[in-house]
Amino acid sequence: MTEFWKMSGAGNDFVVFDDRDGSLGDILAESFLRDVCRRRFSVGADGVLALRAGVRHPFSMKYWNRDGRPARMCGNGGRCICLFARLRGAVDSDGPFAFLSDAGEHRGLVTSPDSARIWMTEPVVHYLEGKTDYGGEHRISLVDTGVRHAVLFTRDRSWGEFERMAGSIRMHPGFQPEGVNVNYAVLTGPSSLELRTFEKGVEAETLACGTGAVAAALCASEIFAGEVILPVDVTVRSGLVLTVGRDDGGWWLEGEARVVYRGFMEIPAT
């Protein structure tokens, strides 16, 4: 029997394994990961996290989407793995600590028993409000915050366009073969916005997306320069708030990260 933890980062939920001894390396294969994320048939989650031993860092993080395929980064997953690492004894510092994802080096900080902050790798802005042909007159920004995100600002808080367009934008040939996560954002104040995100690999809307929150806050600060003041509170689909800011360490993301429950599962023989 293998222990797992179920964790939530502002509504993004994950199955989390401690694989610092490397014993799960061959087991965490695409078919198993896909099966364990199936809601109603298994644990169910947006993705799977593995805590792995570090070389020059206390630990590293590996992340897979619900489709069983790896992704370079997950912002809410990164915050959850920081709390998990602290609870499992991989870090013992009360202050910031460094760790690795497939996107690069990060710093993490457990800010309370149920919240954590991470500093992102430096985002790459491909373009802001580019003129597009994605099914109408949309101006889309493309930003890589460890995962590529298309960001659209709208005044339509009924979210009708999101429901209709997000999946088609995600699959648009102009974003292939890597694809994008799709974010619709509404500015609600100089330091607040509401956000909905359709995530590739999940192929559906999720209740929260950390890398998407950072992408939306970054785009807002650039597009509406002088009107948007950092840090920005981002209300996600779960109704919870993620806070995004920037300091000398770069762009950071903070919000809820908590353990939902712990359990054991039978791992199929490889």
Image: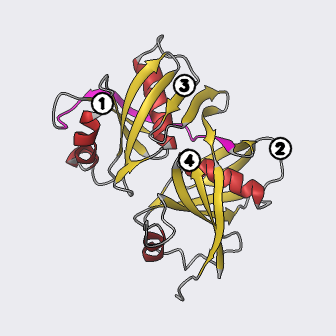
Give percent across and percent down for residue 12: 51, 50
Prevailing secondary structure class for the magenta stretch in the rendered image: strand
Q: Secondary structure at mark 2?
A: loop
Q: Which residue is mark 2?
A: 94
Mark pair 3, 4: CA separation:
16 Å
- Amino acid found under the numbered disc labelled 3: Val
Of residues 143 and 90, which is closer to you in this image? 90
Q: Earlier in the sequence, mark 2 or mark 3?
A: 2
The front one of 237 and 191 is 237
Between disc 1 and disc 4, whose residue precedes? 4
Badge 4 or badge 2: first in the primary sequence: 4
Question: In the image, which disc is placed on residue 76?
Answer: 4
First of labels 3, 4 by sequence position = 4
Asked if residue 217 is among those painted magenta in the image, a careful observer would answer no
Q: Indicate which label's residue lies in the foreground, 1 or 4.
A: 1
Identity of the amino acid at label 1? Ser
Q: Quadrant of residue 102?
A: bottom right
Residue tagged 3:
232
Q: Give the magenta part as a residue range.
A: 115-134
Neighbor class of circle 4 (other Cα within 10 Å; few <14, some 14-19, many 20+) is many
- Circles 4 and 2, Cβ within 8 Å, touching? The answer is no
Residue at 25% x, 34% y: name it: 160
**For the residues marked 1 and 4, what is the alpha-carbon distance in whole angstroms?**
26 Å
Q: Which residue is mark 1?
A: 158
Q: Residue furthest top?
A: 226
Give the CA separation, mark 4 to mark 2.
20 Å
**Is residue 118 rendered magenta in the image?**
yes
